[in-house]
Image (tube, grey):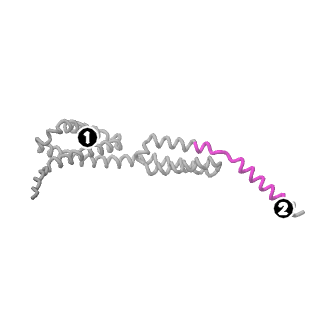
Amino acid sequence: MRTIKLLAVITLILTLGMVWAGCAKPPEAEKEAAKQAMEAALSAGAEKYSLADMDAARKAWDTAESQMKEKKYNEAKQAYIDAKAAFEKAAAGVEAGKKAVAEQANTAMKLIQEDWKKLRVTASKMGKKLKEKKQDWAADTKAINEGLIKAKEMIASAPAEAKAKLDELKALIEKWGAAFKQMATPTAKPKPAKKKK
């Protein structure tokens, strides 16, 4: 008799546990809140200026999505809550990230302007050697001058784009620096062949 009562209690507990587990609902509200936080972070520019925090938030989101597929709703609920907090942190870090990138862009701007000034002096000394590449030099000179103006304007509003523009200009200046170096190197005249005896 005792065994039957014990089995009945165990069966009741297991049945209640299964019913309770089966009644867990997908955390749709938490998922929606996390999704809105993600969209806010993206529109704030977290992909450019708060990348580490954004990566952490995406990992939390991916974990939550995986748990939803596995119907682990309680774990998914917590993961969505964590993802929402991480996306909010990423969005909050955008201004500090923008400021840091703007400082980097300003530093790069100064260095590029110095290099550009030196390169123009070198170009003026090249004289006749530059004659063959005069059109290319003129086109690139115009592109560099315009690019520097544009990058300077962009630093305050879009520092990441300004930095990318400055990287392009730096590559162009370095290309001409290498070209001028090659032009300045005297070409070796071929030695006359020795006569065979």
- The first of marks 2 and 1 along the sequence is 2
* Residue ID at (41%, 46%): 94
Name the side, left or right, on which 13 lies relative to 93. Answer: right
- Name the residue nearer the viewer: 185 or 90: 185
- Assess disc 2: are there few (<14), some (14-19) or many (≥20) residues with their C-alpha within 10 Å of its C-alpha: few
**Amino acid at the residue labelled 1:** Leu
Magenta stretch secondary structure, dominant: helix
- Give above or below for 36 relative to 195: above
The foreground one among 112 and 185 is 185
Expressed as whole percent of the image width and height from the top left, the position of residue 76 reads 61, 49
Residue matched to label 2: 6
- Quadrant for the C terminus, please: bottom left
**Rendering quarter of residue 176:** top left
**Residue ranking furthest to the bottom:** 2
Span highlighted in magenta in the image: 5-31
Q: How many marks?
A: 2
The quadrant in which the N terminus is found is bottom right
How crowded pointer 1 is (Cα within 10 Å; few <14, some 14-19, many 20+) is rated as: some
Alpha carbons under labels 2 and 1: distance apart:
84 Å
Which label sits on residue 148? 1
Which x, y percent locates residue 75? 62, 52
Q: Is mark 1 on a helix, strand or loop?
A: helix
Residue at the extreme right: 1
Give the quadrant of residue 4.
bottom right
Q: Is residue 136 magenta?
A: no
The residue depicted at 21 percent of the width and 48 percent of the height is 178
Which residue lies at the image location 31% right of the left edge and 39% below the top edge? 154
- Going by the numbered disc 2, the residue's amino acid type is Leu
Assess whether residue 21 is covered by the magenta stretch.
yes
List x then y, in percent, for residue 110.
24, 47
